[in-house]
């Protein structure tokens, strides 16, 4: 019985959390489901409280100031070059010796947007490493990927961390409708999907500037964030919804030093008039017109099924049990999109506890699990970011608005690259840990006799640790 209890605990940590830490399998073995539920009930669950992290407005203004300084510096250098050298050629005695070694170049400091990005990334990984189980962090990662933005779009880079903290973490155990509105009205999303510059053709700004409508955000809200691809909406619904959310934009930092980079509703950009979306008429009442559409989308049955299916795929199986999807769909509708209740339903469903572990951890989950296992948190986040880049899941840089795939097929071809990362991690961590002792920490009764034997035969501690990180039981959830 004890072995079964520990197997359930290990399964809970790998499937719902971010992997075991020292002692966690034994700590939750008496009631794995209860431990997961308890993590949901902890005060401030999912929040990051690091005082040095910037709000979206602060980050946007800091990045803007940096770009302006760089621009001024380039202009000054260009002007100096056009005016010729500022001084004559140095006297021979002042010239460097031909035999002197070349001066070493200092490592260039990252620009302000990258500094902000790195600080946010470090706080995110620290939260993952410190979590008792990591269930809430996994939920944060799930929703951040569902409502993804991309740092590859220049102005968004400095805003990614603030976006995840303000739109996702704040509502991760709240109501879907609130998270939906927070995500779609956040400056990072408005910039990423081009709504910040979308102008109603018949708006005051549209008639004066002859600029046009952008449908990107409206389409992705319907197709990816709520109803799902090819469900109940038409192209006319996309266009009408795009008109409704014109005016949802960002305060330009150049124009307002106090509120620059923050969300604003600009009535001059807003398309006037009532609009029809999925058979319902929405009167023109400014920003409330868009909020009303989002509220209805959040409660639509198609949205409930879309979210339930994605959640089941991310945590349980690439082809999730229909009974699990049905149960999650019902609870979503019955609770008005209560995300904490939805997480409870997931954990309490028997279909979510199948002993078969067919799903491959995503690269980010696997890297985090490695740090949790060894207890060696990264001091410098840059090698972690480089590793995730190499493994095909660069932080806050999804390949498309759909986000990163949750299905194992998307990651299976990258196993060879994981070996390279495992060897690098093991080389740094092995002197600080005992790989043999970590087998039970990492896997407990999930470790097969073959895995234990393979690690026991390793020629060195780094090789043993790398083999543990690459063990099939550690790769899967």
Image (spheres, rainbow, N blue to C red):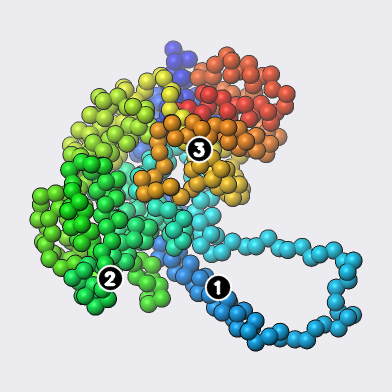
Element at badge 2?
A: loop
- Above or below, 338 relative to 448: below
All told, the count of numbered labels is 3
Residue 397: in sight, yes or no? yes
Tell which circle, 3 or 1, labels the residue nearer the N-terminal end: 1
- Above or below, 373 relative to 255: above
Q: Nearer the viewer, residue 1 or 195?
A: 195
Query: For mark 1, what is the residue?
Result: 70
Circle 3/circle 1 CB separation < 8 Å: no
Tell which circle, 1 or 2, labels the residue nearer the N-terminal end: 1
Measure how far apart labels 1 and 2 are at the Cα level. 29 Å
Residue 344: x and y in percent read: 30, 33
Query: For mark 3, what is the residue?
Result: 363
Name the image quarter holding the N terminus: top left
In the rendered structure, the answer to whether residue 151 lies left or right of residue 322 reads right
Q: Which mark is residue 211?
A: 2
- Above or below, 33 relative to 164: above
Residue 374: in sight, yes or no? no
Element at badge 3?
A: helix
In the rendered structure, the answer to whether residue 473 lies left or right of residue 137 reads right
Residue depicted at 33% across the width and 27% down the height: 319
Q: Which mark is residue 251?
A: none
Front disc: 1 or 2: 2
Residue 289: x and y in percent read: 17, 60
Q: Nearer the viewer, residue 36 or 204?
A: 204
- Above or below, 45 relative to 133: below
Element at badge 1?
A: helix
Question: Residue 263's quadrant in the figure?
Answer: bottom left
């Amino acid at each position: 019985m004890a072995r079964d209890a520990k197997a359930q605990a290990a399964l809970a940590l790998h499937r719902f959390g971010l992997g075991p830490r020292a002692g966690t399998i034994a700590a939750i073995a008496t009631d794995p489901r209860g431990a997961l539920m308890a993590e949901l009930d902890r005060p401030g669950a999912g929040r990051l409280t690091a005082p040095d992290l910037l709000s979206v407005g602060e980050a946007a203004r800091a990045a803007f100031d940096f770009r302006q300084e760089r621009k001024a510096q380039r202009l000054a250098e260009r002007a100096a070059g056009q005016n010729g050298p500022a001084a004559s050629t140095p006297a021979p005695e002042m010239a460097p010796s031909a035999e002197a070694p070349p001066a070493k170049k200092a490592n260039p400091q990252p620009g302000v947007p990258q500094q902000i990005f790195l600080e946010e990334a470090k706080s995110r990984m620290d939260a993952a490493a410190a979590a008792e189980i990591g269930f809430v962090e996994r939920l944060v990662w799930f929703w951040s990927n569902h409502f993804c933005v991309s740092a590859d779009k220049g102005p968004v880079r400095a805003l990614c961390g603030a976006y995840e903290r303000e739109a996702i973490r704040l509502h991760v155990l709240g109501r879907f409708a609130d998270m939906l509105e927070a995500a779609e009205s956040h400056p990072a999303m408005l910039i990423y999907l081009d709504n910040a510059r979308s102008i109603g053709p018949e708006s005051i700004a549209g008639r004066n500037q002859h600029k046009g409508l952008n449908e990107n955000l409206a389409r992705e809200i319907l197709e990816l964030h709520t109803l799902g691809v090819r469900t109940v909406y038409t192209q006319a619904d996309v266009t009408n919804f795009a008109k409704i959310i014109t005016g949802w934009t960002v305060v330009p930092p150049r124009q307002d030093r106090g509120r620059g980079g923050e969300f604003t509703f600009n009535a001059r950009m807003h398309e006037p008039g009532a609009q029809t979306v999925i058979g319902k008429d929405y009167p023109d009442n400014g920003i409330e017109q868009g909020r009303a559409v989002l509220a209805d989308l959040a409660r639509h049955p198609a949205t409930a099924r879309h979210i339930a299916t994605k959640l089941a795929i991310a945590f349980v199986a690439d082809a999730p049990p229909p009974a699990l999807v049905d149960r999650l769909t019902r609870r979503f509708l019955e609770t008005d999109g209560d995300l904490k209740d939805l997480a409870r339903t997931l954990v309490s469903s028997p279909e979510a506890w199948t002993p078969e572990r067919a799903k491959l951890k995503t690269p980010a989950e696997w890297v985090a699990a490695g740090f949790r296992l060894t207890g060696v948190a990264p001091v410098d986040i840059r090698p972690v970011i480089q590793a995730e880049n190499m493994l095909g899941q660069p932080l806050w840089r999804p390949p498309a608005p759909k986000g990163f795939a949750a299905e194992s097929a998307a990651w299976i071809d990258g196993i060879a690259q994981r070996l390279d990362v495992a060897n690098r991690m093991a080389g740094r961590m092995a002197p600080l840990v005992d790989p043999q002792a970590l087998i039970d920490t990492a896997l407990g009764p999930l470790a097969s006799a073959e895995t234990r034997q393979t690690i026991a035969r390793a020629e060195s501690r780094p090789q043993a640790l790398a083999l543990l990180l690459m063990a099939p039981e550690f790769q899967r959830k």
